[in-house]
Amino acid sequence: MTTYRLAVIAGDGIGKEVIPIGLNVLRQAGRVTGRFEIATTDLPWSCEYYLAHGVMMPADGLAILAEHDAIYLGAVGFPDVPDHVSLHGLLLPIRRGFDQYVNLRPIRVLEGIASPLRHSDIDMLCVRENTEGEYVGIGGRFKRGTPDDTAVQTSVFTRRGIERVARYAFAQARRRKRRLASATKSNALQYSMVLWDEVIEGLRSEFSDVEVARYHVDALAARFITAPESLDVIVASNLFGDILTDLGGALQGSLGLAASGNINPERHFPSMFEPVHGSAPDIAGRGIANPLATVWAAALLLDHLKESEGAALIMRALEQVARSGPHTPDLGGKATTREVGEAIMSALGKVGEAARR
């Protein structure tokens, strides 16, 4: 039996409430399949850690994480710590330091959960470039405190960076419906997005079996609302992908369903898996946070570790609870976080037993 070493960063707010449920589900999947065990290293890195130590993680943080097979993250954020401090102090250094250049976001409406749209057949996969583009952090502020206060923020796009994330997206499209939508804005961004378009176009011949459509990102955002059933795999830059996937989370019925993988496809470094609902300080400690996104992220984690059986069982259990309940208040129900977690564990046992018959 394989033992996987997970670095666990529960983080802030509801992250501390949903991560234990995700770990329980991961361990249950290992028991049901009889294939693996989970060993964890619990790391207290968070905004609370920042307020005590002045940093989001210690100087040797990446070296500590590198000793693990994957990273399981809850949520980071606290009102007393500016968001740019927490983001640039923890998440972005991990993504860049471990070359997690793919951010993978499934966008699917589950049976039993109402989307705000009339469409029920939403099933997309967004592949977001995760290490360069608009979030490289190059720029500065000048003449602060004067009427000429100026901010400069520079995006960086490289042919290598675009091509590798595009190849990943093409490969995902080839495994699904062989349709790829590329988010661009080359009419206004005549350097970065023209390069983006050229790279996508250059890969067409290599993936001739995949139909490629190019959309300006504003038109693509509209298509998310008017014709989501026409979309399958979407590839987008860091900023465009960030915005589109949050729109996708809303289409799913709740950000409590939005799961994410920050992936180094070559497996030179550990990849990181997380729900992306944020730390939600307004409901933290009330026991009503939705754990479904965290469980979905656990399935993505197992799939990355090539434990496809365990990942599939977790998704079937999650789908059963989505269909039949119980649901937390964000989905119109009255269940607690713990009650939903217990229902997933029970469903996982049942689908595992059925699979063995």
Image: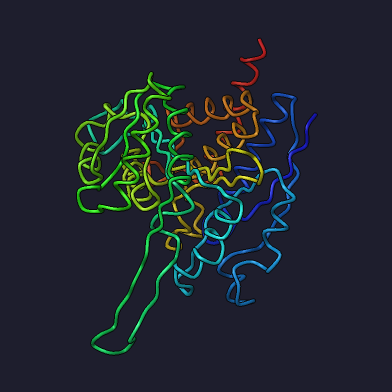
Residue 332 visible, this orientation? no
Q: Is residue 20 left or right of residue 278?
A: right
In the rendered image, the vertical position of residue 298 relative to residue 31, given as above or below: below
Which percent across, then down, holds residue 352?
Answer: 63, 21
**Rendered residue at 31%/45% (across/down):** 247
In the rendered image, the vertical position of residue 356 relative to residue 226, given as above or below: above
Which percent across, then down, holds residue 241?
Answer: 37, 46
Q: Quadrant of the C terminus?
A: top right
* Res 21 quadrant in image: top right
**Rendered residue at 74%/39% (across/down):** 4
Q: Quadrant of the N terminus?
A: top right
Q: Is residue 134 left or right of residue 18?
A: left
Q: Nearer the viewer, residue 293 or 284?
A: 293
* Res 97 quadrant in image: bottom right
In the rendered image, the vertical position of residue 267 relative to residue 348, given as above or below: below
Which percent across, then down, holds residue 220?
Answer: 24, 40
Which coloring applies here?
Answer: rainbow
